[in-house]
Image (cartoon, rainbow, N blue to C red):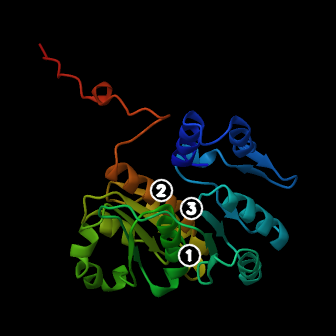
Amino acid sequence: MDRDRLATLLEDVRDGKVEVPGALDALRHFPYEALGFAALDHHRDLRQGVPEAVLCEGKTPAEVVAIVKRLAKAGAPVLATRADAAVGRAIRRAIPAARYHPRSRVAVVGSRPASGGDGIVILTGGTADLAVAEEAAVTARALGSPVETICDVGVAGVHRVLDQLDRVRAARVLIVVAGMDGALPSLVGGLVSQPVIAVPTSRGYGAHFGGLAPLLTMLNACAAGVAVVNIDNGYGAGVLAHRINRMASAPAVANGRRPDRARWAAPHPQRVR
């Protein structure tokens, strides 16, 4: 249950539109719901602004479907990541409105309206990185952030990313996905003022070590302002980019209260004697 749905429920109780027993029933599984094989965190959306996602690896199709159905009933968007084709089919049979993205192996039930603002731009080093990039894009879009993807602009042909600088600089936050040597995020970070989220992928040969080489390159990026998520973690990059985009497009709210901006104001400089 997100903040808006909870506020509406409380207002309906106040106005007499919902009786107390009905409100108690709506809050029965708040903050979590135990299924025996899973404890669903319905409170997460209220705490973090992002609902719980389902990692499908290691779960049976029946378990995934049961979890997705219960999360969807709570009203927030549901993302099921690392869902193979069989799991994707099972979700769509159970919930016909679900959408399955085979390349990124993500199933989505519901989405939030896209917010205004500049949104997120995702760049990939190569076409081979598109599965991870799509996971990030699907995630951020479901959460309500506008997303644009620019493909195949790796450093082997640096003129390609330079040709896209106007589009890149129009974004509020960037996700840069690359395998091989993983140099693209540092290059982009040196050309823009926006935060850059770097995503190493497991695409490469030999001493690439399944994504370890680009991960280390990105962690050692020469350009400042580059943050790095785990290998192939498009979901994590999409969530982080959405949070940054949301913070920039609306006043921050913590625990229902707007922050005291004066508290964070820089102190007056001290005179050195």
Amino acid bearing label 2: Leu
Give residue 136's position: percent from left, percent from top. 50, 69
Q: Quadrant of residue 169?
A: bottom left
Give residue 19's position: percent from left, percent from top. 68, 38
**Mark before the other along the chain sequence, 1 or 2:** 1
Say what secondary structure mark 1 lies in.
Answer: helix
Name the residue nearer the viewer: 29 or 137: 29
Q: Is residue 245 left or right of residue 191?
A: right
Residue, far top: 273
Label 3 sits on residue: 230
Amino acid bearing label 1: His
Label 2 sits on residue: 240
Residue 2 can be seen, yes or no: yes
**Mark before the other along the chain sequence, 1 or 3:** 1
Name the residue nearer the viewer: 84 or 10: 10
Residue at the (74%, 59%) spot, across then down: 70
Give residue 87's position: percent from left, percent from top. 75, 77
Name the residue nearer the viewer: 40 or 150: 40
Residue 200 can be seen, yes or no: no
The reply to whether callout 1 and callout 3 are in contact (CB within 8 Å) is no
| Tag shown at residue 208 | 1
Work out how far the residue at label 1 is from the one at label 3, CA to CA, in angstroms. 15 Å
Work out how far the residue at label 2 is from the one at label 3, CA to CA, in angstroms. 12 Å
Q: Nearer the viewer, mark 2 or mark 3?
A: 2
Q: Quadrant of residue 221?
A: bottom left
